[in-house]
Amino acid sequence: MRGAGCGRGCGVTRTFSSCSAVAPKTGNRCCISAAPYRGVSCYRGLTGFGSRSLSNLGSCGFGYRSGGVCGPNPPCITTVSVNESLLTPLNLEIDPNAQCVKHEEKEQIKCLNNRFAAFIDKVRFLEQQNKLLETKWQFYQNQRCCESNMEPLFNGYIETLRREAECVEADSGRLASELNHVQEVLEGYKKKYEEEVALRATAENEFVVLKKDVDCAYLRKSDLEANVEALVEESSFLKRLYDEELQVLHAHISDTSVIVKMDNSRDLNMDCVVAEIKAQYDDIASRSRAEAESWYRSKCEEMKATVIRHGETLRRTKEEINELNRMIQRLTAEVENAKCQRAKLEAAVAEAEQQGEAALTDARCKLAELEAALQKAKQDMACLLKEYQEVMNSKLGLDIEIATYRRLLEGEEHRCGVSSSRGGVACGGLTYSTTPGRQIASGPVATGGSITVMAPDSCAPCQPRTSSFSCGSSRSVRFA
């Protein structure tokens, strides 16, 4: 566009672009007049203009408010008129390096603006992160409180387990003492049992000895009976012998006819002698039989009494042994039950200790994790605060740099003689004015000419802001 050629030729630090500058609109008009070149850029102070179209003035992100820009909702430009005297080319004789310097300054300001916007975004992001960390910190604080509330419960549970363990230990000691007592009683019963077994063996030995004596007595009785029978047979034999001798003697006597008469006072009576001898033998046999029978009876009675006594003793011993066996079985069952109960109690104590240790370990792990998370959150917060402080320091430096640039721009504006005139802005020899009924047209700018731009209404130019120029209407003008 030719209307923008002045900006390029005069070394403006901001480029001005326009989508359309000749759209006809109804309303007021804004006149922009250019004065002769005075050795400096006429657009030096007009940096940061932005617009979609010169014919559609509206709000912009950067730039001075000029023409109808600051008015309350102005209508669009209707007509544009061009002064023919402005079509003559203007020889400004500008230093060719000035454009490069201005372009570099423009790029630096763009970079600074981009960096400032990036820092602003980073500051907002860090503020969000700070809020998030504050929320997490509050959550961890609340969770820490809940955990501190759980600690008395764990302590109470641990104390209960300790009391149960102490009770189990006391019961274990009592059961151990009872077990020792039962073992002592069992040892006593074992000793008694061994003594009774020894007594039984002794009684059995005595019974064997007595049985041997009875056998000997029976054998002796048999021998005596055999002797009695032999003596009876012998006496019978002798009796028969004596009878035969008597018969022989009687036969000899009867055969002898010699009669000898002797005066013999002795009268030998063989019958009496035999009877006497027989009586003696019978008496001896009867006495022997009586003695043998009496001795045998006494021995039998004694053996029977001994057998009865030893049988009673054996029966009592068997009963005691059975009673001891039953007691041993009962005590063994009680000992086994006590051992099982002790094993169960020891298992319960071990399980309770394991559960307590596991719960305590879990609680300690959770506490350590929460402390680690809290420490990490603190470190993250410290890092974020450090980054935030660095960003704030960078922002402060940028603010100082921006303020410096602003002062430089204001000094440049004052040096270029920026002033408001008739509702317009004059930059050096270039004047922006709002005159009704005029039109703007593109073309070469002539010395001393004027460019008139139709605008809905006019207002005084806005005050310059820090590195930006804002417009009040809904449309914007960007010069490139």
Image: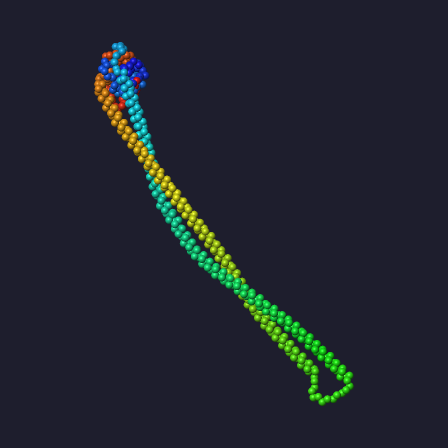
| Residue furthest bottom in the image | 263
Split into 4 quadrants, where in the image is the C terminus?
A: top left
Query: In percent of the image, x 67 and y 75: which residue is there?
Result: 231
Location of residue 240 with respect to 155 vertically, above or below:
below
**Which part of the image, by quadrant, shows the N terminus?**
top left
Answer with left or right where residue 468 lies relative to residue 268: left
Can residue 432 be spotted in the picture? no
Q: Quadrant of residue 141?
A: top left
| Color style of the picture | rainbow
Q: Residue at x 45, y 58 (%)?
A: 181
Percent from the top left, x then y, of residue 257?
78, 86
**How many circles with numbers are drawn on the protein?**
0
Compared with 138, 48 (above or below) is above
Residue lying at 29% horizontally and 12% vertically, measured from the top left: 443
Residue 274 pos. (x, y %): 69, 81
**Is residue 274 at all visible to an observer of this figure?**
yes
Q: Residue at x 22, y 19 (%)?
A: 415
Viewer-nearest residue: 25 or 415: 415
The image shows residue 422, relative to residue 288, as above or below, that is above
The part of the image, by quadrant, that contains residue 130 is top left
Give x and y (percent) for residue 234. 69, 76
Can you tell which quarter of the image residue 297 is in? bottom right
In the image, residue 389 lies at what x, y percent? 29, 32
